[in-house]
Image (cartoon, rainbow, N blue to C red):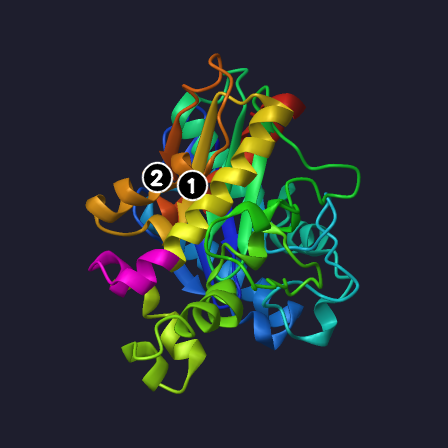
Amino acid sequence: MQIVAGVDLGGTAVNYTLLNRKEDFLIEELCEYPALSREGPDVCLKQIADGLDMAVKQAAVTLGDIAVVGLDTPGPASATGVLSSRGSTNFVHAAWAGFDIREALAKRLGKPVTYINDGNAAALWGHFKLFGAAARTSSVSAIVGTGLGGGIIVNGTVIKGRKGFGGELGHVLIPYRNIQGVDGMFPLCNCGRPGDLESLCSLTAIERTLLPHFLKQYPDHELGGLGDLRKAAKLVRSLAESGDPMCREIFRVQAHALGVFFDEMINTFDPDALIVGGGVVEVKPEFQRWFLNEIRAGMPPQRQEQADIPIHIMPNGDTAGARGAAIEALNFGRSSGLL
């Protein structure tokens, strides 16, 4: 049996999946192992290898069956897996700065390793699920979490760019002042740019910008009495689900920001589909439908020929990164003759 592995390396956990040549996943559920990224590259790479051994046992295969390993991590990193000289998101150990994680993992495992950033990996999985591996279609994905990741697939291929920073959708500037309810707001991203998508669509944006802004309009709201914006921000989603007016307003602004952003992507790529993932849509069906409708409401009028572009929910959200990394490995294995 010849298979590929998908390894999704996060700040605290590694997720694994295995994929065969027929495009069947041998691990369907979440397969997770501690990452220990805070301990630095040597400890973390050993953890990846130990967890991969656990994953193959769970799937009743062997390490020898794996032809290619696909790895994804948070960025910023080059297209070949060299982490930024400032380090990577959630990888706080100084030794990660400028570290070639793809090459180091390939040496440790003794196998070819492909690299893709986690936003692109999730986007690749969402596209694969909708269209299959061979479809020459295009899609744009936005994954809303602590920050905002995403990816662009054109003709079935993920856009990585010259240095690997293609698909950094969170840092695309949007005309946010056109969104109702943001008067007097100055959304500033962690990257230092005001008015990019992440500055409005992320948990960080709720804590730093949206919640303080709307608490001024709702001075008696229960979240204002907590005295801890970080803790309060984490409660906004559940309150919005239950119909809380202020929290719904916060998510309406986020939905309309996504609508404006998707309009830019429609006019740039004319994609076959738009995909939304992350905690913002890991909610009850009623709230999910409301949020998608608000994204539509936030879009400027479309050309008649483009008004039917569908908006999908990212499937298998917890395992999307590992699945996308496995698909990247599968494509490499096929093109290089390893599969």
N-terminal of the two: label 2 or label 1? Answer: 1
Residue placed most toward the observer, 81 or 291: 291
Dot 2: within a 10 Å radius of its alpha carbon, few (fewer than 14), some, or many (20 or more) residues? many
What range of the chain is rendered magenta? Answer: 239-249
Residue 277 visible in the current orientation: yes
Quarter of the rendering containing residue 156: top right
Residue placed most toward the observer, 71 or 60: 71
Residue 248 on the magenta span: yes
Q: Position of residue 75 (x, y in %)?
A: 65, 55
Mark 2 secondary-structure assignment: helix
Name the residue tied to disc 2: 292
Q: Position of residue 307 (x, y in %)?
A: 44, 20
Left or right? Give the position of 280 relative to 50.
Answer: left
From the image, give the main secondary structure of the stretch colored magenta. Answer: helix
Question: Which amino acid type is shown beneath numbered disc 1?
Answer: Val
Quarter of the rendering containing residue 198: bottom right
Are the two marked residues, 2 and 1, in contact with CB atoms closer than 8 angstroms?
Answer: yes
Mark 1 secondary-structure assignment: strand
